[in-house]
Image (cartoon, rainbow, N blue to C red):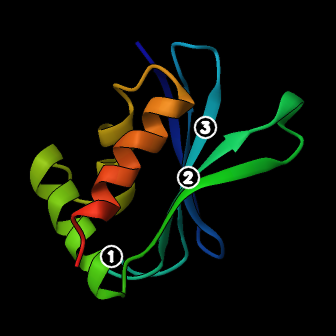
Amino acid sequence: MAKVGRFVTDPKAGAYCRIALESGEKIVVNHDKGSLTAGTLSVEVSKFLGLGSERVFSCDLASAAGRSVLARLTSATGEATPLAALVHYVEQCRSVAEVKDRCASLLERAP
């Protein structure tokens, strides 16, 4: 089971949550500054010792595809905020490959 860290909010930068996956890989789920229906949701893989990261998923919530993704996330997870919904959506994943697949499936069904 993945270990979900605390949610950190920065009024200027947005919010994020670190997750340690079962495989030992670590990801960061971000919602950059913006309202609940705006901004960008993203998932990044932390590199060795936290020095740098690789973005594996990004979605602009203001776009038509982003609104569709957000609607599916919040209805599927029951979470009220985009960050909490995406964290809940990926926390069952065992590896980064599985996170990539789950996030890709979100975008495939978007208009």
| Mark carried by residue 99 | none
Residue at position x 12%, y 48% from top? Answer: 76
Left or right position of 75 against 70: left
Q: Distance from label 2 to label 1 (Cα)?
A: 18 Å
Residue position marked by numbered label 3 in the rendering: 27
Residue position marked by numbered label 1 in the rendering: 66
Q: Secondary structure at mark 3?
A: strand
**Frontmost residue, 28 versus 35:** 28
Name which residue type carries label 3. Ile
**Which dot, 3 or 2, sits closer to the camera?**
3
Name which residue type carries label 1. Gly
Quarter-wise, where is residue 64 in the image?
Answer: bottom left
* Quadrant location of the N terminus in the rendered image: top left
User: Vertical placement of 106 versus 77: above or below?
Assistant: below
- Whether label 3 touches label 2, CB < 8 Å: no
User: Vertical placement of 17 versus 92: above or below?
Assistant: below
* Quadrant location of the C terminus in the rendered image: bottom left
Name which residue type carries label 2. Tyr
| Mark carried by residue 16 | 2
Counting from the top left corner in percent of width and height, residue 12 is at 65, 76
Q: Distance from label 3 to label 2 (Cα)?
A: 10 Å
